[in-house]
Amino acid sequence: MFPVKGKRVLITASTEGIGRGVAETFSENGATVVISSRSREKLKSAITEMRRVSPSVYGIESDMTDYKSLASLVSYAIKVMGGIDVLVVNTGNPIREPVTFSETEIVDWENSVRLYLLGAIYVTKLALEDMVKRRWGRVIYLSSWTVKEPQSILVLADVSRSPLLQLTKILSKDYGKHGVTFNTVLMGSFNTPGAKRTLSKYAESKGVSFEEVWKERVLNPIAVGRTGDVKKDLGSLLLFLSSDFSEYITGTSILLDGGTSSAL
């Protein structure tokens, strides 16, 4: 794997699903990791389990929609790790997803924008200062292929996080001279608890089985015929993007979707 031993990595929303798998990948490859969650119980459980593999795992409660808690998260990460080399911005799902535009209320949009966009912007601003001082850093936003091919039932997420592509481009130009890179990974489908919860709600609303929906909306569109493996497919990519080998890659979005998207 690509060398990240000794790197100090902060991963948001990382006690289950994609975030957890990413955190474990970094930890298993020698990085020091700070994880976070809104749930104290999930956080305690994840730290206990991950420390069986590596003692260099820390965690704190944090909410991507709460600026005060994000400030505490970054402050804590810098305190326990001595700095932040890599920031991986991961998020959960909006409260109302899946939902179409006509079904949304303005409060849904406010929550989604804070979750996907403003939270990402704020945590980036906080972590970036430390990276610039040391003239080295990696910022990676985890997004979805549906940003390029928006889906009606994912209107909140797809609209709220699409501006991160522009942010990635702008910051890459502004901070490249400081040794900090910015990239967005447009993920395909992964077999995670969050994905299953979202599609279970959709299946129930349509009066059909979860298995039918999973096959139609998840498996059938994937060219390689399977969902992604968090550690093998996503984790290995993030290790590369977080290493010295990736310093010439910045300001871009990378499709990691098994051939699901038709976008170029």
Image (cartoon, rainbow, N blue to C red):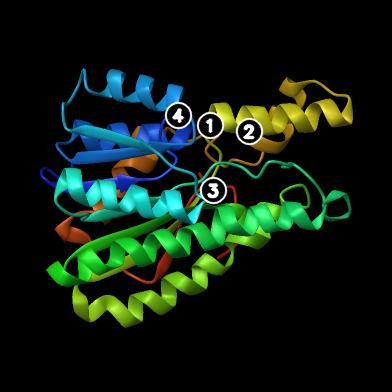
Of 132 and 66, the residue lying toward us: 66
Q: Position of residue 63 (x, y in %)?
A: 49, 44
Which label's residue is closer to the chain start, 2 or 4? Answer: 4
Pointer 3 or 1: first along the chain:
1
Q: CA distance from mark 1 to mark 2?
A: 6 Å
| Disc 2 target residue | 219
- Asked if marks 3 and 1 touch (Cβ < 8 Å), the reply is no
- For disc 3, the marked residue is 259
The label nearer to you, 2 versus 4, is 4
Label 3 vs 2, first from the N-terminus: 2
Residue linked to disc 4: 16
Marks 2 and 4 close (CB-CB < 8 Å): no
Secondary element type, mark 3: loop
Crowd around label 2: few <14 · some 14–19 · many ≥20 (10 Å):
some
Instruction: Please name the residue that numbered disc 1 is placed on.
Output: 226
Q: What residue appears at the point 41 percent right and 52 percent down from the top-left corner?
A: 70
Query: What amino acid does circle 2 point to?
Result: Leu
On the image, the x and y values in percent for residue 152 come to 78, 52
- Which badge, 3 or 4, is on the more N-terminal residue? 4
Residues at discs 3 and 2 in contact (Cβ within 8 Å): no
Q: Is residue 249 above or below residue 37?
A: below
Mark 4, Cα crowd under 10 Å, few <14 / some 14-19 / many 20+, is some
Position of the N terminus by quadrant: top left
Disc 3 to disc 1, how far (Cα)?
Answer: 10 Å
What whole-number distance in Å separates the C-alpha atoms at marks 2 and 4? 22 Å
Q: Is 176 placed left or right of 54 in the picture?
A: right
Q: Is there CB contact under 8 Å for labels 1 and 2?
A: yes
Tell me the distance, in whole angstroms, between the alpha carbons under discs 3 and 2: 11 Å
